[in-house]
Amino acid sequence: MQKIISVFLFCWLHAGIALSQTNVVQLDVLDYPGSELANIWGYAAGGNEYALVGAQAGLSIVNVTDPNNISEIVMIPGPFNSWKEIKTYQHYAYVVSEGGWGVQIVDLSNLPGSNLVYKSYNGDGAISGQLTKAHALHIDEAKGFLYVYGSNLFNGKAIILDLNTDPYNPQYCGYYNPIGYVHDGYAYNDTMYSAHIYAGQVSVVKMNTDAVNNTINPTTLGTINTPNNFPHNTWRSGNTMLTTDEVSNSYLAAYNISNPANITLLDRIQSNPGSNSIVHNTHILNNYAITSWYVDGFTIVDITRPDNLIQTGNFDTYSGTPQGFEGCWGVYPFLPSGNILATNIAQPGVGGGRLFVCQPTYVRGCHVEGVVKDANTNQNINSATVELLSTTTNTTTNVSGVYKMGQLQSGTYTLRVSKTGYQTKNTQVTLSNGTLTFNTILLAPLTLPVELSRFEVKNIDNTAHLAWQTASEANSKGFEVEYSKDLGKWETLGFVESRYPDGGAYTFKSDLLPAGNHYFRLRQIDLDDEFSYTDVKLLQIGAGVKLQVTPNPSKGFVRLEGIDPESIQRVELYNYVLQKVAEFEWNGQSGFELPADLPSGVYRLRVSSAGEDIWRNVLLGK
């Protein structure tokens, strides 16, 4: 290991590369030439603070009591491997690795001395001598049980060890069976929140641990799929659970777990939207989520309102070219000093990993929430665009007309709300850190020059045939036909001039379309170049897909075709931000009614059949 002491090099690192940072200051670093780093944990005793660093050669224990002058005390040898996870209980550190040595246990009571006692635990009782490796671990400190995840035993299911009698000599209690491999998880007060990475689910499990008889009797209380269906780790505080999906373009997600049988997704956030960055490990401290994001370093997110997550701090530890699984592996925010520890897997120019000691300033976000309604009918308006002008803060209303967003910077801004068919409205709002600003916005409908009575899109020989009918027209120039593959970017396919002052019929034909979903809308333009949009129409071009939803668009009743109804286990409906809005009991029928109170728009239908989840878009039109 080597400390960076050159003033020139320090300035180059902090000025030449211009690492991104907000509300975080770097205090010191320690380099590990020739050794990659894995996860990080911390330990404090006797007024001293320590970093427990997972290095390739073992467990590196670093004195960080003086955060401006950190130094390694000792390297506890372990398997030479790039994967290591550490947790502590009382004055013991527990280390697991995919490289072997079972669960390594280190007695930290002699710190800050370097003469530490350690050993490897390879199982006892029914698994005596069989536990050789594991991916991760967590400790239920309230109950005194160690959870080992992704081991070589039981196909990687969670193994539970009792630490109550003697933390240096764990006792095997059993394993959690129902769902399968557990990659990582969080456990507290006899409840486990396990990340089944390959199943795409997180489960909440009441463990019913018995320290007297060294037994467990797990009961699964509830499960939920994560936004990217690849959950890596979990953390919990009160009725809020956080998850991270370890894939490109992933999310830190928050859930309400007050009723584990009905876990609900509240919100999700990305550190750097559009960059395809990958989230890794998250922790919760005082309603802040401190999270490692590989090439983005680590972030601080205000989760005071878990249905409206706001990033209020970050530190980009990685100065190299972003390439997926590089940069910050782990972060630890629980030292008494409040300093944050972070590890980079490999640091460009070092030839190995780097340990960071940083000082955060925790700042609450400015929350902006409200509801958008029709000024004439008082009905909620969904899919309205809400934005703070002169900032990048924006969102859209949900099916209940509700919008929730926020930012770090306080001040007075113009809140703009817009929706096709309504007059845009601007409102002044004053935002303060740690404060919720709530507004009800009433939008007045536009009086349009064209009354559209019909608009439909059909597939004929893999081409889209559009047809629409106007009941009346006044001052109309014509219609632009717009097309999108994903409801994101729209392109103009053509223009059809207005031909019928008193209303008439129009048609338009597209070129050949590939298999997949295709979206169409009309942009009606009047003689003054004012314009309005029609509703979006979905056209599905098949490519041997076994499941089809018909009719699509639907006015409420849908059928599932191309699949055996008896094989269907569950059918659920989600809105376009993946909030579940309905679940249907399935008794082998082929058709069903969608809820009558749903507004028009695009929905996602999830059909579980023979162990497979199939997603299809459904366009609901009233």
Image: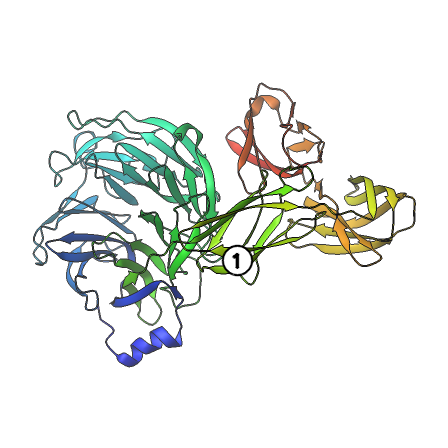
Please determine whether, in this image, residue 253 is positioned above or below residue 546: below
Estimate the x, y position of residue 289 in percent, counting from the top left.
36, 50
Please determine whether, in this image, residue 582 is positioned above or below residue 512: above
Q: Quadrant of residue 620?
A: top right
253 or 370: nearer the viewer: 370
Quarter of the figure with the C terminus: top right
Structural crowding at the residue carrying mark 1, measured as other residues with C-alpha within 10 Å and reported as few (<14), some (14–19) or many (≥20):
few
Estimate the x, y position of residue 585 in percent, counting from the top left.
55, 22
Residue furthest top as drawn: 587
- Which residue shows up at 87% across the image and 47% down it? 473
436 or 387: nearer the viewer: 436
Q: Quadrant of residue 408?
A: bottom left
Residue 45 makes an appearance in the image: yes
Please determine whether, in this image, residue 46 is positioned above or below residue 4: above
Residue 515 makes an appearance in the image: no
Quarter of the figure with the N terminus: bottom left
The residue to which callout 1 is attached is 274
Compared across the picture, whether 559 is left or right of 615 comes to right
- Which residue shows up at 40% across the image and 66% down it? 20
Compared across the picture, whether 91 is left or right of 441 comes to left
221 or 117: nearer the viewer: 221
Disc 1 residue type? Gly
Estimate the x, y position of residue 357 in percent, counting from the top left.
26, 63
Estimate the x, y position of residue 335 in percent, counting from the top left.
22, 54
Kind of element beneath mark 1: loop
- How are the colours assigned in the image? rainbow
Compared across the picture, whether 397 is left or right of 23 comes to right
